[in-house]
Amino acid sequence: MTRHSVRRMIETVFEIMVETTFDAAHCLRGYGGNCEKLHGHTYRVQCFLTTDELDGRGIAFDFREIKKALAEAVSDLDHTFLNDLPSFATQNPTAENLSRLIFERVKSTLGRAVAKVTVWETASSAATYSEA
């Protein structure tokens, strides 16, 4: 195999990320520790999209469209008690469940290019949801 043919086998992918934040309170039912008590976070949410193509302008995705979709996906979460939302009536509003919920919402707007969503509860604690 020549060096040139090996190069053609390498797949190139662009990954685009947009970030937002929202503030909310929650408590984790059945946790058995401090997090079972009412407390809040400034959640940091990162939405990642991937593609192997750029448009004629050299753009993979319009950041404005991603920011708008992400803002819509978290709008009802901001400044709420997450446990009161229908999405968390039977499941805990953990970072894991939040990342899945936001992923599903953004994907319904932007489509299959959405690769993953990461939700940060603190500067050192995050959960990521993606679909294989």
Image: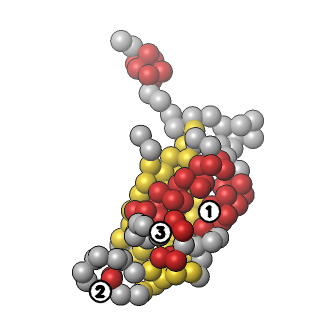
Residue sitting at x 56%, y 81%: 80
Residue 5 vertical position relative to residue 40 in the rendered view, above or below: above
Pinpoint residue 53: horizontal percent, then vertical percent: 62, 34
Q: Is residue 124 left or right of residue 77?
A: left
Q: Is residue 116 visible?
A: yes
Which comes sooner in the sequence, label 1 or label 3? 1
Residue 34's tag is 2
Residue type for callout 1: Ala
CA neighbours of label 3 inside 10 A, class few (<14), some (14 to 19), many (20+): some
Q: How is the image coloured?
A: secondary structure
Residue 59, image quadrant: top right
Residue type for callout 3: Phe
Pinpoint residue 21: horizontal percent, then vertical percent: 56, 73
Residue 80 vertical position relative to residue 94 in the rendered view, above or below: below
Q: Quadrant of the N terminus?
A: top left
> In front here: 120 or 79?
79
Label 1: which residue? 73
Q: CA gap, disc 2 to disc 3?
A: 19 Å
Q: Residue furthest top?
A: 1
Residue 118 vertical position relative to residue 40 in the rendered view, above or below: above
Q: CA gap, disc 2 to disc 1?
A: 28 Å
Residue sitting at x 59%, y 59%: 18
> In front here: 92 or 45?
92
Which comes sooner in the sequence, label 2 or label 3? 2
Label 3: which residue? 88
Residue type for callout 2: Asn
